[in-house]
Amino acid sequence: MCVFVALYSSYALLLALALLGKLLYDTFVSYDSSALVITLVAMNTLVILALLLQMVYYGSKANDQFLHHRGILLRSQFAVRELACEMATLSSGAHSLHSDADAKQLLQCDQLLHSVIKCLEVEDQTNPVRILGIRANAAVVQSMITLVLGTISTVVNVVYRARVNANA
């Protein structure tokens, strides 16, 4: 997904640079004010949308890290609980190699992992990365990609029609 966001953003910025070239051409060579205004508005819109797309994408990745780290900690907690069960079955025999201190340490480790997992869940719910007040996630990234592509096609269409009308 990162490659697609980078490609879409770079295409939008490339088109904005092409529009900047057209803007300079219209300003200093052809003096066509209607094409100048259309180009200027289109260029600014594309740059803003491309930058917004990048912000939403990286915000989405930051929000996904909460879930990723939560999963890692849950696996660690499962391993600690598995170890505690093994210790309990081994210590039930006549020749116990493990002390009660080891069992207490495993219990404390399990409780610590549980509290860290809960803190991550609360942090994810209360303070997610937001862009323009909206929680950044994959659905917003897909919507932004659609918006950027729609804007690019509209800009190309409007600039082409303005150019055809100017030549007619």
Image: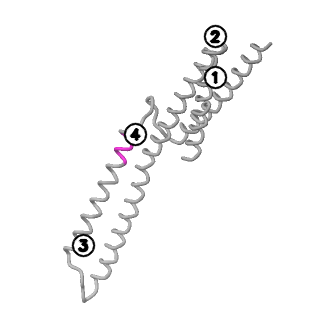
Q: Amino acid at mark 3?
A: Ala
In the rendered structure, which disc, 1 or 3, sits on the residue that comes first in sequence?
Answer: 1
In the rendered structure, which disc, 4 or 3, sits on the residue that comes first in sequence?
Answer: 3
Nearest to the observer: residue 166 or residue 10: 166
Q: Amino acid at mark 2?
A: Ser
Location of residue 80 in the rendering, given as x and y in whole percent from the top left corner = 33, 68
C-alpha span from label 4 to label 3: 37 Å
Could you tell me which secondary element the residue under label 2 belongs to? helix
Nearest to the observer: residue 112 or residue 15: 15
Q: State the residue at coordinates (29%, 63%).
A: 110
Nearest to the observer: residue 104 or residue 124: 124
Q: Which mark is residue 128?
A: 4
Q: State the residue at coordinates (63%, 27%).
A: 151
Q: Residues within 10 Å of mark 2 (few under 14, many from 20)?
A: few
Quadrant assignment, res 114 = bottom left
Location of residue 54 in the rendering, given as x and y in whole percent from the top left corner = 50, 37
Q: State the residue at coordinates (23%, 69%).
A: 105
Q: Residues within 10 Å of mark 4 (few under 14, many from 20)?
A: some
Label 4 vs label 2, nearer the camera: 2
Could you tell me which secondary element the residue under label 3 belongs to? helix
| Residue labelled with disc 3 | 103
Quadrant assignment, res 149 = top right
Nearest to the observer: residue 115 or residue 95: 115
C-alpha span from label 2 to label 3: 80 Å
C-alpha span from label 4 to label 1: 41 Å
C-alpha span from label 1 to label 2: 12 Å
Q: Residues within 10 Å of mark 1 (few under 14, many from 20)?
A: some
In the rendered structure, which disc, 2 or 3, sits on the residue that comes first in sequence?
Answer: 2
Q: Which mark is residue 33?
A: 2
Label 1 vs label 3, nearer the camera: 1
